[in-house]
Amino acid sequence: MTSAGRFAPSPSGELHVGNLRTAVLAWLFAKSTARKFLLRVEDLDRARSGAEAEQLRDLEAIGVRWDAAVVRQTERTALYDDAIARLTAEGRTYECFCTRREIQEAPSAPHAPQGAYPGTCRELSHAEREIRRASRPASIRLRSDVAEWAVEDQLSGRFVGMVDDFVLRRNDGVTAYNLAVVVDDAEQGIDQVVRGDDLLPSTPRQAYLATLLGAPVPEYAHVPLVVNHDGVRLAKRDGAVTLGDLAAVGIPAKRVRNLILESLGLPAGPLEDALPFFDPERLPREPWVWKTPTG
Ligand code: GLU
């Protein structure tokens, strides 16, 4: 199977410079290790009509190119259902009828880490499940037999994080992100995951799930985010932060690309020309503070 890296945006709106910088990094990591680079649209949730086309256009405008047709998660439900069916056949799932509120109010299990699912529905009897099914659709949770799992991150080193009985399929029938991402990375031959370091805490769950599904655990590199002048993760409300906004104040896509490259200690110009200079060891480990340049 191919060896590949990827960028996997959620088409919830336009990409901002933080998202674009992560995409550039994912491309650099993949290309500098002779991998293919794939683009996957994570449209199971939060999709806004038209956003995918804008995102692809903006990635191309800064020179990010992908090596195969774009994959969309909404077209891959059968793969997710199949993975859940396999886990279910192994006794590794259960139905959960809890509302968010019930989870918040439930006494947590002894020694359970904060935020872990308290296990309310884990041991329901057949009869109890029948009763609950009549009143509410169930979500499907993983019956995890570990409390934490370790991953190795190329930038952060060893990271140990919580693994609880996390949701695989929501009670509205939508596949949960943690399941979809693991199934897709395995099925697409993605063995290198580069993404924002806000996602590091979910990585142990994903690595554990990959192991249960018999899939290889990819290499991980969680990269620093872009922040505003208050040190808070960049968001649309921080002024001109998308290519569209920046173009409107006289800053073209190529200049944004160059600013991103400079923030990574790389020479301005086409991404291909920066590639020979890319060295993950020398990447800045601090968040990049974005200041909208003057036109
Ligand atoms: N779709 C996720 C996001 O845009 C990224 C998931 C991933 O890279 O694994 O935040």
Image: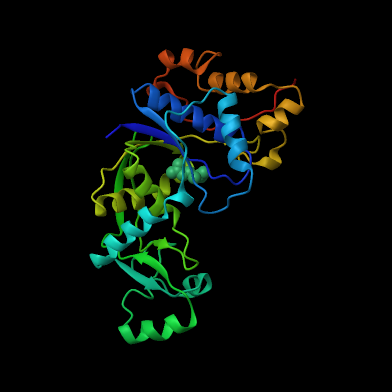
Residue 153 picture location, percent across and down? 34, 37
Quadrant in which the C terminus appears = top right
Residue 162 picture location, percent across and down? 36, 55
Can residue 229 be seen at all in this image of the molecule? yes
Establish if 166 lies above or below 271: below
Q: Quadrant of the rendered structure where residue 244 is?
A: top right
Quadrant in which the N terminus appears = top left
Residue 176 picture location, percent across and down? 44, 57
Residue 45 picture location, percent across and down? 54, 54
Establish if 275 lies above or below 116: above
Count the marks: 0
Q: Which of 102 and 269 lies nearest the eye of the viewer?
A: 269
Q: Quadrant of the rendered structure where residue 107 is?
A: bottom left
Tell me the residue at 35%/61% (across/down). Answer: 164
- Relative to 111, 102 lies left or right: right
Q: How is the image coloured?
A: rainbow
- Relative to 265, 240 lies left or right: right
Establish if 277 lies above or below 260: above
Tell me the residue at 39%/70% (across/down). Answer: 118
Tell me the residue at 38%/33% (across/down). Answer: 5
Can residue 149 be seen at all in this image of the molecule? no
Establish if 259 lies above or below 238: above
- Relative to 82, 108 lies left or right: right
Tell me the residue at 47%/25% (across/down). Answer: 284
